[in-house]
Amino acid sequence: MEPAPIKDPISFEDFDKLDIRVGTILEVSEVAKSDKLMKLTVDFGDHQRSILAGIKQERDNPREIEGKQALFVVNLPERKMAGELSQGMLFDIGYADKLTPCLATPETPVPNGSRAG
């Protein structure tokens, strides 16, 4: 893989606007109207959210990530896709570089809702 150029610098204030949190993926289910999206039900400690992720064709078994902790961006506006509402974004590694994506996960288990940054 040839590393991509580093993006233009941003201010710390811009970075600080992102709310990236750890959540446990409770369930991965089909999105009927999509051949790319899967619906993740994620526990953030004080609440659960539905987050759509384009992982259906990236993994032999998308449900293999059930029970795992991962990082999610939780302060994006809700977005309707393929008839389902997504309340955040899975923060994974590799897709932009055309690699098989993998989860960005904490090194050791941490409480759901823990913030990154």
Image (cartoon, rainbow, N blue to C red):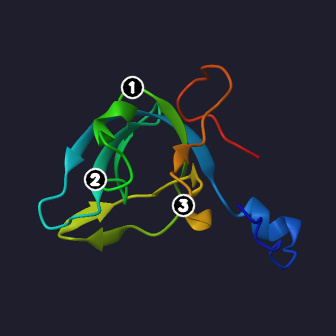
Ranked by sequence position, the earlier of labels 3 and 1 is: 1
Q: Residue 42 in the image: state x and y as whole percent.
A: 38, 39
First in sequence: mark 3 vs mark 2 = 2
Q: Residues within 10 Å of mark 1 (few under 14, many from 20)?
A: some
Alpha-carbon span between mark 3 and mark 1 = 22 Å
The foreground one among 5 and 30 is: 5
Q: CA distance from mark 1 to mark 2?
A: 15 Å
Task: Please state which amino acid type lies under the numbered disc 2.
Answer: Met
Residue that label 3 marks: 95
Amino acid type at image mark 1: Gly
| Mark seen at residue 38 | 2
As displayed, is residue 66 above or below residue 8? above
> Which of 99/55 is in front?
99
Which x, y percent locates residue 113? 55, 35
Residue 51: give its label: none
Q: How many neighbours does mark 2 have within 10 angstroms: few (below 14), some (14-19), or many (20 or more)? A: many
Separation of residues labelled 3 and 2 (CA atoms): 16 Å
Q: In the current view of this chain or complex, which residue is farthest to the left?
A: 32
> Label 1 belongs to which residue?
67
Secondary element under disc 1, as helix, strand or loop, is: loop
